[in-house]
């Protein structure tokens, strides 16, 4: 039995579907089972990662956990939650993030109130838990461009910072497929031993944000323009949306860094799954209706 958390999200939902297709017994964790719809054959259980007391029943009989964590919002409960998981499960695949420093790298600790700091906290807790673990560290999610959807629908123009920032965006389906391969022992990565591995995942190509917007326009059949925002304006908008200051500043700084140091492409998706990572243009075609 494999428990998937974040099962109503993009990566978690893909993991549930792919595990089911692989013939694996899969259990989906959600805070409100009555309001969710999963494919037939998925066991849906109530639980909240921010409230470890709700997890024992959900973890009963579970061997492995695909952990999608509610970054920052549940960090206060992380020590107790990981301890609870370790009481029941044998192994865990954690959806972390590229850029989390490895313990032996000699890199200063991340701000605990930042996104990378949150992921670093979870990684360290998992490493000390006694669980057999594997960390998936994807770079930019293609799905993050959905933050532009309302602008594209309403105006046909994306206003954001650093159009020259370059990313190797990854399809959520590929992130889930990498995790499913590790959990089930399928794919070309079998036999190499996934325990203790930190896999950096990416899409197959590097595109600037302007090129990403162009690809979305091609997918929806009408041109989409790009308009650069100043970093100060972008930071203010993130803060107005309720972002914690450390996380908002981290985001703005990261985009500035990707202008001069683009994200790199890795072959890990293909190595784990046996098929190449999905190009962003295909992701845009898959999600065209979200932008129309």
Image (cartoon, grey):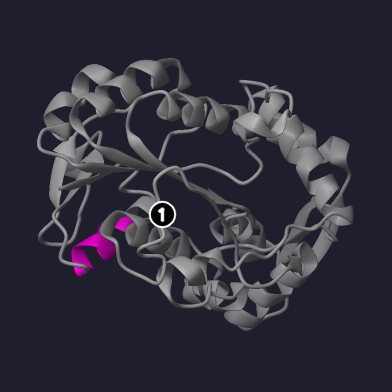
Question: x%, y% of residue 274?
Answer: 43, 76
| Nearer the observer, 48 or 2 | 2
Q: Quadrant of residue 200?
A: bottom right
State the residue at coordinates (76%, 31%).
249
Q: Is residue 260 left or right of residue 85?
A: right
- Residue under numbered circle 1: 11
Answer whether residue 27 is magenta in the image.
no
Pinpoint residue 216: horizontal percent, then vertical percent: 64, 73
Toward which corner of the image does residue 284 lie, by quadrant?
Answer: bottom right
> Circle 1: is it few (<14), some (14-19), or many (20+) Cα within 10 Å?
many
Could you tell whether 263 is left or right of 112 in the image?
A: right
Q: Is residue 71 above or below residue 259?
A: above
Secondary element at image label 1 = helix
For the point 79% across and 47% down, the residue is: 255
Residue 232 lies, in percent from the top left, at: 86, 35
Q: Does residue 25 lie above or below 78 as drawn?
A: below
Which segment is the magenta one?
15-21
The answer to whether residue 14 is seen in the rendering is: no
Is 101 left or right of 166, judged from the image as shown? Answer: left
Image point (72%, 39%), residue name: 251
Number of marks in picture: 1
User: Is the residue 118 above or below the residue 174 in the image?
Assistant: above
Please tell me whether the stretch drawn in magenta is mainly helix, strand or loop: helix
Q: Quadrant of the C terminus?
A: bottom right
Residue 16 is inside the magenta segment: yes
């Amino acid at each position: 039995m494999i428990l998937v958390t974040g099962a109503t999200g993009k990566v978690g939902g893909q993991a549930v579907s792919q595990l089911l297709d692989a013939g694996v017994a899969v259990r989906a964790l959600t805070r409100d089972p009555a309001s969710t719809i999963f494919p037939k054959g998925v066991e849906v259980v109530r639980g909240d990662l921010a409230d470890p007391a709700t997890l024992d029943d959900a973890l009963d009989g579970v061997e492995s956990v695909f952990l999608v964590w509610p970054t920052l919002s549940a960090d206060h409960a992380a020590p107790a939650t990981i301890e609870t998981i370790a009481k029941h499960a044998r192994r865990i695949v954690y959806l972390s993030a590229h850029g989390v420093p490895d313990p032996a790298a000699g890199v200063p600790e991340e701000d605990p109130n930042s996104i990378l700091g949150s992921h670093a906290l979870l990684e360290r807790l998992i490493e000390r838990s006694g669980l057999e673990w594997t960390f998936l560290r994807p770079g930019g999610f293609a799905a993050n461009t959905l933050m532009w959807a309302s602008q594209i629908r309403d105006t046909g123009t994306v206003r954001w910072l650093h159009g020259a920032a370059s990313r190797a965006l990854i399809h959520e389906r590929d992130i889930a497929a990498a995790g499913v391969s590790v959990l089930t022992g399928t794919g070309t990565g079998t036999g190499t031993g996934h325990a203790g591995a930190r896999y950096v995942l990416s899409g197959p190509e590097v595109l600037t944000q302007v090129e990403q917007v162009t690809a979305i326009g091609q997918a929806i059949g009408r041109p989409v323009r790009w308009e650069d925002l100043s970093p100060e304006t972008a930071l203010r908008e993130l803060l107005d949306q309720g972002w914690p200051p450390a996380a908002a500043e981290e985001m703005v700084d990261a985009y500035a860094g990707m202008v001069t140091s683009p994200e790199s492409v890795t072959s890990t998706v293909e190595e784990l799954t046996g098929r190449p990572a999905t190009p962003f243009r295909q992701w845009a075609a898959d999600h065209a209706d979200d932008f129309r």
